[in-house]
Every structure is written in C-alpha cells, then in structure tokens.
Amino acid sequence: MNQTLAADDAGAVRGESVRLNANRALVRGWLYLVLLMLFALVLVGGATRLTDSGLSITQWKPIHGVIPPLSHAEWQEEFDLYRQIPQYQQINKGMSLAEFQYIFWWEWAHRILARGVGFVFALPLIFFWATGRVERGLAPKLVGLLALGGLQGAVGWWMVASGLVERTDVSQYRLAIHLTLACAIFAAIMIVARGLAPHSEPAADSGTQRFAGFLVVAVLVQIFLGGLVAGTDAGLSFNTWPLMDGAVIPGDLLLLEPVWRNFFENVKTVQFVHRAGAYALLLLALWHMIAVRRRLPGTTHARRALVLFHLMLIQAAIGIATLLLHMPLHWALLHQGFALVVLGFATAHWRGTKGAYPLPTEIRVAR
C-alpha cells in the first residue's frame, strides 16, 4: 500500500514538473517574441532620431493616432500642425508635403510599433494568467514589466513635448532617459525569460554573479551616454580615432558653467565621455573574462564571459567605424542595434550565473 502511494506521489510530481516546464517554455517563447519586437522598436526609434523625424507628429493620440492620414485633406492638416513648431519654422521652412510625409512615416511607424509591443505583451499575459500558466512569484514581475511599458509611452511623449515649443529638437536629457528606459525594459524581460530557461550549469559563486550584474549596469550606463551623443549630435564632430581633436584627452572639456552641464551639453565632452566609457567597459569585460575562466574553467559561465568580451570588441569596432564614416544612417543603426545585442547577452549571462528560477514549493518538497 505504502509503495503504491509513494509511486502515485512520484507520478504526480513528475506530471506537475512536466506541466511546469511546458508552461515555462510557452511563457519564455512569448517573452522572446516581445524581445524581438522591442529590438525592432529601438532600431526604428534610432532611425526616427537620425532622420530628425521625431517631431513630425505634434499630438499624442494613443487610440486615434493608430490611423494615419487617409486623404489629402488629412495630410494637409497634419502638415499644418507641424508648420507651427520651431523645427519647421527655423530649419525645414519650405518643406514640401512629400518631404513631410517621409519624416511622418518614421515617427508613425515608431508609435504604431510601440503600441504593438504593448498589445503583444498584455493580451498573452491575460491569457496565460487566466489559464493558470503563470506560476506564483512570476505574476508580479510580468505586471511590473507591463507597467514599465506604460511608463515608457508617457516618457516618449514627455520627450517629444520638449521639442514642440522653444527647441528645434528634443531634449537630449529626455532622449537619453527614453532610450535607457527602453533598454532597461529589454534587459528586465531577458532576465525573466532566461530565469525560466533550463540551466546546464549550477549557479556560479557570489563574486562572479555580482561582477556579471555590475557589467549589465555598466552597459546600461554606456547606452545612456550614447543617448546623449545622439541627442546632441556629438557624433558629427571630432570624427577621428584614436585621437580626438588631435589629443588623447582634448582641451576645452569644461567650458560651460556650472561644470556639470559639460557632461550633458558640451558636444566635445559628451563624445569624450562616451569614448572613455567604451574603453572602461572593455577593460571590465576583459577582467571578468579572465577572472571567470580562472575561477570556473571549462564551465558555461566561463565560455559566456569570453563571448561577452568579444561582443564588446565588435561593438567598439562598429562604434569607431561609425565615427570615422561621419555617422551614416545604416552604421549608426548597426551600432545602436548591436548595443542591444551586447546588453541582451550580458543580461542573459548574469541571469545564467544565478541559475534558473526555483521550482514551486510543493514540487521541491515532494522531491
């Protein structure tokens, strides 16, 4: 009798484990789809900035804005709204309707893709929750990600609004925040997806975990610095390497008062700090790679640390090429897109050092 009960219990545990793993695989696949859409969204956002298209839609219509102009009269109405803002009056005066349509479509595509990401995240979440596929402890993470997505939409409009009254472009402060928040959401989704995946190695030691996590933060900081470069058009100046303005450390880095403004508004300082951040990030990744390969030789953690270092080398090379070529659109987008690849891999590597999410209590106890 006892043996029969034990066998029944073991069968129930196996069945529950199979169900849990199937649900995790389903949720993980959905999150990877969201990551692909976010990747596309960030690239389209970058193209919107690089083509100076971000102010072409001067109103925020979360629902009605899904429908683009469908007639000549509607196009003319949108164009008239654009002609009222400083960007048109000071930079694009005399622009034709066809030229306006070009920049309009970039901004519209960015906004419609952002809405699409919201729907692709929210609707499956409701389904998974209603059908019991969201395990305990995972729901708050997913709801938090949904809330961050809503916040990102508000930050996007806050950014656009900065360029509608007095400026001819958006604030570099707000642009950098908008980009960094998008990348932080990307990293957070990667963390959840990777935590739901099977792990071939046990968790790494706490030192390795901490440094891998620090690298993720460092990559996000570097992306923020890149946002400042984009927001100030700093990449269009000082297009030489390895020297900048003829020196390793150029002069006139602290011209503005108060001094802190130079790090956000002085084009030379903004670009120099981004360069210095890239060098620092490479050194951190090199140190991490060497340390993990010595501490955990032959492990997946060591191999991923090696891959991460080489990804950062490639990103540095892309950045240098983009600078030397004077920021052509395709190279600049490649640089931005590969930054997300680096961030995604760094995040997955950190989550991998921590091991998979634990099993629910009832399965652990039964085992």
Image: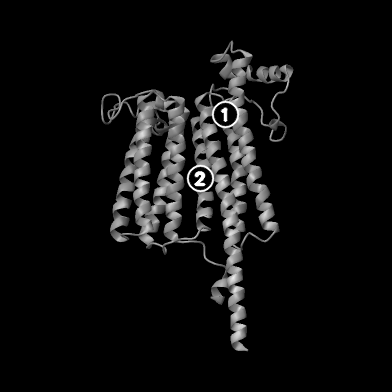
Q: Amino acid at mark 2?
A: Ala
Secondary structure beneath dot 2 equals helix
The amino acid sitting under disc 1 is Ser
- Residue linked to disc 1: 162
Query: Which is more toward the observer, 267 or 330?
Result: 330
Q: Which of pointers 2 and 1 lies earlier in the amino acid sequence?
A: 1
Q: Is residue 276 visible?
A: yes
- Going 57% across and 27% down the picture, which residue do you hit? 54
Q: Position of residue 251 (x, y in %)?
A: 29, 26
| Residue identified by numbered label 2 | 184
Asked whether the residues under the numbered discs 2 and 1 touch, taking CB atoms below 8 Å apart as contact, a structural biologist would say no
**Residue at 69% from the left image edge and 35% from the top image edge:** 62
In the rendered image of this protein, does residue 14 appear above or below residue 164? below
Q: Label 1: how many residues lie within 10 Å, few (<14), some (14-19) or many (20+)?
A: some
Check the image and report above or below for 69 versus 12: above
- Disc nearest the viewer among 2 and 1: 2
- In this rendering, the count of numbered labels is 2
Q: Examine the rendering and report whether any part of residue 178 can be seen.
A: no
Q: Nearer the viewer, residue 223 or 256?
A: 223
The residue closer to the viewer here, 206 or 319, is 319
What residue is shown at x 34% (from left), y 40% (from top)?
Answer: 313
Residue 37 drawn at (x, y percent): 57, 41
Q: Position of residue 92 (x, y in %)?
A: 56, 15
In the picture, the quarter occupied by the N terminus is bottom right
Which sits in the foreground, 288 or 273? Answer: 288
**Local SS, label 1:** loop
Could you say which quadrant of the image residue 228 lies in? top left
